[in-house]
Amino acid sequence: MEKTNPDYGFFRVATAIPTVRVADVEYNLKQHIDLIRQAHSEGVQLLTFPELSLTGYTCADLFHHTPLLEATRQALLHLAEATKGIDMAVAVGAPLSLGNRLYNCAVLLGDGVIVGIVPKVYLPTYNEFYEARWFASGAEIPDGSWTELSMTDRKGKRISQRVRMGKDLLFDFEGTTIGIEICEDLWVPAAPSNRMALAGAQVIVNLSCSDEVLGKHAYLRRMIEAQSGRLVCAYVYASAGFGESTTDLVYAGKGLIAENGTLLGESPRFETEPQLLVRDVDIEKLRVLRQTQTTFTDLLSSKVQTDFHSEYYSQPLPRVNGYQVIQLSRLSAPDFSQRLLRHVTPRPFVPSNDDDMEARCSEIFNIQVQGLVTRLQHIQSKTAVVGISGGLDSTLALLVTVRAFDKLGWSRDRIIGITMPGFGTSNRTHSNSLGLMQALGITIREISIKDAVNQHFRDLGIDSSVHDVTYENCQARERTQILMDVSNQTGGIVIGTGDLSELCLGWCTYNGDHMSMYAVNVSIPKTLVKYLVRYVALQMQAPGAAQATAVDQRTASDILLDIIDTPISPELIPTDDKGDIAQKTEDLVGPYELHDFFLYHFFRYGAAPDKILMLARKAFQSEEYAAEREGTYDDETIRKWLQTFCRRFFQQQFKRSCLPDGPKVGTVSISPRGDWRMPSDAWSTLWRGE
């Protein structure tokens, strides 16, 4: 599991909200330099300031005065000098002229030079805004334009720099491409960032000066999240704060960083001190998502031109989708393995708050139910047969089946729940399985598998004292045979109970619990199953919960909560002397919360093992996780089970290649007919570091 990418595909970005003195360029320059130094100490690679940050946004008619504009040009050259040797790109806002026109510009600086200037295209001139009074739209600047910035230093030496200026510029740091918007650009129907993303920009920065109006900030946050999701990009937004407020308007200072629809961080508003918000965005993840989202790539222009060259830009600039791409040297990365500035949840399938949890569980449960309703109605099944073990998976499958029958208006006695005690069945699970079926008002059958399995052992000459894989699988296949035969006997179908995590690890018996006629849990990871069961249990406890005929809601709820607390086990090894569970799955195959974490990042984003290992350390060795779980996983443990995951995922693909139908409920699904097509004989060498 050696590191395959020195930066793990991350890129560190930041928003800087300085305190501002309107029209005091020298003061504002010092504020910028202080924040640049602070950001550099944080390892920031791209820093974004607000719109017109060097002068202040509210200068109004002062924008037409020569002293302000001259001071701005000199400040830009000073600021560029301040970036020399710090290996960081900095985007600042400034008013700049080209010919006889003045433009509201974003200026990208780095390594001592001004890299490029992007003018604002859409100028708000409505309500409280009056930009067209002072600025021209950048849309009128011909592509391929240049401007020259110059100043005289204290020794009387003339310093000047010729700079590319235009709305058609992107900036590429050896694979990390940056596009620049300015405030209103985000709000228009056809945002420039749409085309920027299609031209390859994974990071969009927005230099803004958005005043505070009741309800506006919440709307803005949703818009930024949505834009980052629609464009599969990172969106870095910096808006002016303290000192900018004047006359009728209040500016609170807003720094927001979003990635692929999720807000990574937000700076506090209404502060009087400078604010710096730093986050690490996952460029590698964005690349993978764009590659797999074919409707995104279908919009890409395949035409790439290289059409100009200059003494300043040492290489010709390619034009992609109408944009000139300025190629720059790679920005050296901080050590992300030591300090990763983004939250990594240890349970990526599980919502972090109660409101989201209830909404998510409701939606998932309804998807499962609707899929089963469609199948039952289509084939006009007379019954549904479910094997009830007293564990989480079979419980969830039964709850889904009960809800489906209720939705169809079918009697619950047409649901046949079968508990099949074997050599490892514990008193607790046996009692819970019978009690739950009775409380839910379904038909109950109990069929012991012991005699049949012992006969099978005798027929095959198997020593029943040897508790090997054959001993276990004989029991699993006997149970499946009973379920299949009862379904034939009663004109029904077998409802599968196995979950996503088990199938990814191959922790199921081929043609045993691996098989069914409709698998309702096939897309539900183990870490989410218990939350779905708890969701149903709490619904039953809620005041005014619907009371169905022959259903004891309160008893059912109590049993469900006890099932949630029962250790996960296939119960194929004899119980201990007290009749309790002796075989615990997670002792054998590893903790499911680790495996679900590995699965999410491996499947969803194509992450390499070294990156998964680094992310797992961040998630499972944090103080937050330690406080919640009273302990953490050490490196050795994480490595061990990650190796197990990679090995089993590849070795057990043959089981997933012939899965029964089942509803897709999330972005991670391993149906061979849908989301996951993989040869059964692929080698895991690259993923196991062998």
Image: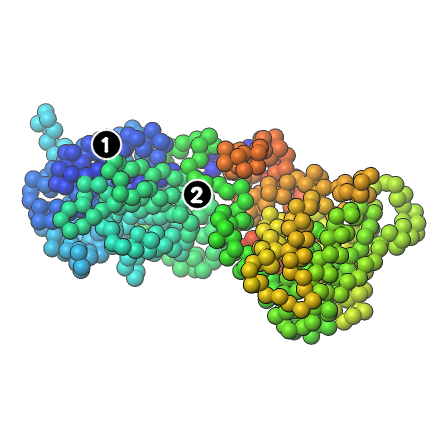
Residue type, mark 1 in image: Ile
Q: Secondary structure at mark 1?
A: helix
Residue 683 location in percent, x, y? 65, 44
Identify the amino acid type marked 2: Asp
Q: Nearer the viewer, residue 502 or 656?
A: 502
| Pointer 2 or 1: first along the chain | 1
Mark carried by residue 33: 1
* Residue 240: numbered disc: none
Residue at the far front: name it.
543
Quadrant housing residue 401: bottom right
- Please name the residue shown 29% across and 44% down the image: 269
* Residue at mark 2: 282
User: What is the crowding at mark 1: few (fewer than 14 residues within 10 Å), some, or many (at least 20)?
Assistant: some
Residue at the (70%, 60%) spot, across then down:
439
User: What percent of the width, then of the height, locates residue 132?
Assistant: 14, 56
User: How dense is the environment of label 2, judged by Cα within 10 Å: few (below 14), some, or many (20 and up)?
Assistant: many
